[in-house]
Structure formats: C-alpha cells, structure tokens
Amino acid sequence: MPIQYYIYLALALFSIGVIGVLVRKNAIIVFMCIELMLNAVNLLLVAFSKMHHGVAFAIDKASTVGIDGQLFVFFIMVVAAAEVSVGLAIIVMMYRNTHSVDVNFLNRLKN
Amino acid sequence: MSKLVYLVPLFPLIGFLINGLGRKSLSKSAIGVIGSGAILASFVTSLVLFFEVKNHGAIPVQQLFTFIDVQTLKIAFAFQVDQLSSLFLLIITGIGFLIHLYSTAYMNNEEPQHYGRYFAYLNLFVFSMLLLVLGANYVIMFIGWEGVGLCSYLLIGYWFKNDSYNYAAKKAFVMNRIGDLGFLLAIFWIIVRLGTVEYGGVDGVFANAAAKLSSFDVTLITILLFVGAMGKSAQIPLYTWLPDAMAGPTPVSALIHAATMVTAGIYMIARSNVLYSMSHIAMNLVAIIGLVTALFAATIAIKQNDIKKVLAYSTVSQLGYMFLGLGVGAYTGSVFHVMTHAFFKALLFLGAGSVIHAMHHEQDIRNMGGLKKKLPITHITFLLGCLAIAGIPPFSGFFSKDEILAAAYAHSPIYWGVGVATAGLTAFYMFRLYATTFLGTFRGTHDQEHHLHESPAAMTVPLIILAALSVLGGFIGVPEILGGHHELHHFLAPVLTTEKHHEIEHGTEFMLMGVSVALAAIAIAVAILKYSKKPELQDATGFGKLLANKWYIDELYDMVVVKPLNAIAVFFKNIIEKSGIDGLVNGVGKFVNYSSRQLRLLQSGQVNAYVLMMVLSIVVMLLIWLQEGVIFRVFAKLFY
C-alpha cells in the first residue's frame, strides 16, 4: 500500500485535532483532540518506519534500519498515557471547583 | 625698571578682588580708598614708565608666560610698553583716578554693598583696559577688549532694578559682540596667514605683513579689525548702543563711554597702522565711516534734551573725527584727539554729573537753566570744556581737531568741508547745552531750586584738574606753523612711522584754521543768543523732530533686525520646537503607547485564540521553510 494513504489519513486526523482544539470549548473534547493529533503523528512515524525498514529488510534480513521510529511511538504512547492521567486529573479538579469543563471559563485569571 | 610693567594692571586687579570679595564687610570709606588708591598706584607706575619710555625709548616686551601653545602657534602672555601704549596708560590711569575720586562722592548715597560692587567693576574695567593697551599681541588685546565690554555691560546695568537700564546694558553688549566677531575673525585670518599675532619683533605681524600678505588679505584683515572698532567705538552702523549706555552712573559714562573704552577702537587701528597703510580701500572706508558718523551724530545732538544724551552723541561724533583722522593717515592727530577728547569729554561728563547731583537726578535740560550762580565751579569748568570741544584756540580741542582737519584737507577738500561743518555743529550744540543749562532763569521745581548746591570737593577737584588739562593739554601738540614743535608727534614717531606727510602751504593752513575757528565762534554766538533767553521748551517739530528722534535709526534697526529676529524666534519656538522636535519626541512616545495598547489585545486570555495564533505561526514558518530553506539561510547568516 503506497505511503501517501497513510500521510493523507494522518493529515486528516491531525487537522481534525487542530480544528477541534481551536473551536471546541469542552475541556474533555479538547483533550481528546490533542490525543488525536498525537496519534496522527504516531501513525506517520510507524508508516515511515515500516517503509524504510521494508526496503532495508529486503536486502538484509538482519537489518534494523528504520525501526527506531516504531520505538519512538512506544515512548510517545507511554508519555501520552501519563499525560492523560495528569490532564484528566486537572479536568476533574476543575470540574469540582467550577462545575464546568469549559476552557474559557477559567480566563477570569486574566484580570 | 621693566618689572614695573606688571604692576600697572596688577594694582587695579587687586583692588577689584578686595572690593569685589569684601563688598559686604568693608566700610564705604575703605572701599573708596582701596578703589581709588589702586588706580593712583597704577598711575604713578605709569608715570615712571612713561618717563622711562620718553628718555630711553620703548621698554622690551615683557613675557609673563606662554598663553597658548599649539604646534607651531605660540601666543605669549606678554606686555609691551612703547610710546603709544605708555601714552594710553597715562590717559587711562590718570583720568581713571580722577573719576574714581569723583565717584567716591557721586555714589555716596549707595548702600555699602553696591558701593563696593561699583568700585569693583570700575577697577576691573581699568584692569581690562590696561590689558588691552599693554598686550604685546592681538590675543591679549582681545582679552582686554572683551573685558572692557563685560565691564561696560555690568556698569550700564549697575542699577539693575530698572528694566530699561538692563535693556540698555544688553543692547551695548550685543552690539559690541557683533563688532568683536569681526575682530576675532581678523585675528584668525592673521594666524592663518602669518602664524603669529605678535605686533613687533622680526617675527611679528607688522614686520612680515608686506612680504607675506596679499593685498586682499590686508584689506580683509583691516576691514575686519575696523568692524571690531565700529562696535567698540560706536561708529555707524553699530553706534546706537552708546547713547543708551548713558543709563549707567555718570562717572561710568565719563570713564568708559567717553574717555577710555570707546577709544579702544582708535588705539587698535593706530596700533595696526602698518597694516592700514597698506590698504587704501580700508583707509578710505575708515575715513568715510568716521566722517559720516561725525556729521550724523552731531545733527542728532542738536535736538537732544537729556544732558547726558547730548554728550553721548557728541562722543560718537568726536570718535568719528578720530576715525576720519586715522582714515586720512593722521595717526598722531587721532591719538592726540583721543587724549584731548579724554580730557574735555571726561570734564563735561563729570560736570554734567555735578549738575545732575545738584538737581537730584534731573537730566532734562529744559528743567534747568540759570545754574551759573548756584554751581560756580561746575559752571566755569563746564564752560572751559565746551570751549575746548568747540575748538577755540588755545584750548586743547583746537590743536587736535585742527590737525585732523588739515590732514583731511590734504586728502580731499570735501572731507575737510564736512569736517568743518561738523565742527560748527559741535560748537552749536555744546553751547546750546551750556546756555540752556547754565544761563537764563531756573525752570525746575521750587523744591529743586531750594536744594541746589555746589558739589563736594571730591567732585570739584577732579573737575578743576580736568579743566586745567583741557585748557593746557593741547600745547604738547602745537603745530609748527604756530611756532611749536609738536612734541607728541616726535614722541610717537617710532610707533606711527608710516604716517603720510601731506604738505600744505602755510597760507592755506592758516586759512583753514581761520575758517574753522570763525565758524565755531559764529555757532557759539548764535547758540548763546538763541538759547540763553528763550530755550526751546516745546517738543521739536518738522525736521527737528526727525533729529530729536535720532533719525529713527533705533526704530529702523528694531524693524529690520530685532523684529524679524523675534519673528524667527517665535517661528522656531512654536513651529520647529513645539511641532517638530517636541512632536518627534512625543510622537515616539505616543507610537509606543498606541502600539502596545493594540498588542495588548492579543493577550486575551482565550486559550483558543492562543492556539490559533500558534498554529498559524507554525503554518507560516513551514511555508517560509518550504521556500528553499529561507529560515535556514537567515540563521546561517546570523551565526556563521
């Protein structure tokens, strides 16, 4: 399968994530959109990694060229999981204090 | 003997310091003694020096220290006493002492502090004037030149609580500065062309002028020097400050604005006679300016009613005479006239001061009259002064004026004609003044009449001495046709060597003398007949009004120079300063203020907005990066 399809899919996911972050006010939705962007990047990393590794693997079965991209993805997933737990905790605290998950609700700090 | 040279200016300087610093603690009598004593000591020293010069010739240049030393240019702080400067020393310190003595009585009503200030200024003036005369180069002369200008300013504005006096002081200062600029430029030009400012010696200006200066240089230097003289010696077009300078105390007018400071211009040109003799253009300019000033000021003096203003215009007129003499090459005659004029004009001013003192500061001659009986000494001395200035033989003014007129005749009969006409006018306005003041009946208030009194001895003694000098002073310069030897001419011959000798036949010379004396006598007779019984008390009309208003020259200057300058100043203040410079500074502030207020709106607190900006910025950066790595190249340029 050509690499372009992966790129288009990742682009679409990433754009949906960005737009979601920009237009939605619900903190949980914004959070989900951030995850969406992260995963779009993960998808790209995996796709390119597989592409490079596939070329090298055909020449030499023992080659490890390109697999570092896939390793990075694991890292990102671990960090993202940690981030999710922290983020959700913040959102919970926010809800407890303000009974709202609206991101614009907290801009009263401005004044 | 030569060590004495330092002492001459040192005494007045010490007097200035003591009186200036101790004016609040010294008693009035102490101030008077110190002030006058300093000048007397200086006068005695000058006398010794004078006889030294007379018997043994000029004293060698005395160098105190090197004043300026820049590469090849070395200017020494040096004094020079030769025939010319020793004569001026005597005039300055001699008349200066008499006027100091006179001032002790005249200024006696002042508070001690101001009395001390007055004498301090007066001593500083004498110091500066001595520096001017003693200097062995143009720079030292310039220092004295500026010093006397400063003292003139300080003393005109001595009664500083009166605004119009302050205005007069400022006017004098500014007018003098215009002239000083000319003098300064002349010095620079001399330095550029000759690399020295010393007068004498083998390396001096005069010795090298003929070899190293082109005729253009000489003309330029002499004319610039003359511009300086115009300012200091009140010649057209810079004369208007002198009549206004009468705002100062009367002894100041006598010393500074009649006898000494205003003759600095004459001294300077006489000193530079070597240069002037090389330039016919400059000589003619000097003669014409002098002649026009003499006539012009004399016409104004006819219609003035302030006793000091008449004398002031008379001074301008007599200075014009001196410049005429210089311009036609009669340097000795001019210096002679400086001397005799110093005698009789100081006498006249001090006499006027005595009258003003008696009249309780009344200066309008229309309110005087008949003072002959009440002020006998003042009257007699004033009369002698008037006769001297009118040029009646054998009074001093006759000899000096006649010498100038004879030289003018030899140069051009037209010069002589105008000169004689001026002499007639001089006799006329002086005796108009005399008749209106001393003859007829008293016209002042009853109160003034009751208080009329002869001045104290400290005032009358200087008057008597000056009167004697005015009468006898001319005999040191009796021309040969009258059986004299003209001692002054022989005395000054080593300094004023370039004098042209115009030979006039004796018959002609007698005729010239006769005409001028006859004219003066007629003018005197007319003035006395006209004004002793019926002085003009009304304001003048017609042509007389034009004269009374000084040909409206002050108004003209006001219109041509002062008003446009003010307009320019207002323009710069309101437009350039306020809109331009202030506008620029305020504009920068306003711009920063405005733009920061606009930028502040970006920090809205809306997280979405921040993210949007972030995203847009990233997109823009990516787009730029895509453009052949522009960003990379920019950074590469910055860091490598």
Image (cartoon, grey):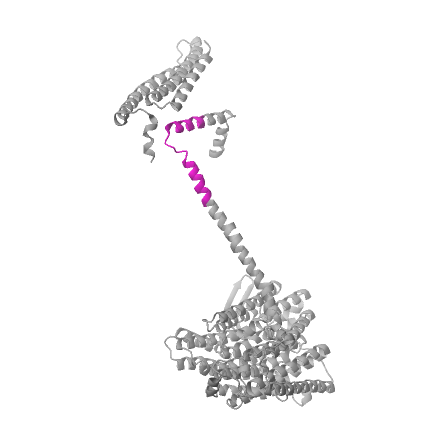
Q: Could you say which quadrant of the image residue A82 lies in?
A: top left
The front one of A23 and B236 is A23
Q: Could you say which quadrant of the image residue B473 lies in?
A: bottom right
Q: Residue B191 location in percent, x, y?
A: 59, 64
Q: Is residue B408 magenta?
A: no
Residue under the image location 41 percent in, 35 percent down: B601
**Rendered view: A28 above or below B35:** above
**Rendered view: B638 above or below B374:** above
Disc count in the image?
0
Residue under the image location 46 percent in, 42 percent down: B591
Q: Main structural element of the magenta stretch: helix, strand or loop? A: helix
Q: Is residue B517 visible?
A: yes
Residue under the image location 40 percent in, 73 percent down: B21
Instruction: Give the magenta-colored segment's residue range.
Output: B589-618
The front one of B591 and B85 is B591
The front one of B173 and B225 is B173
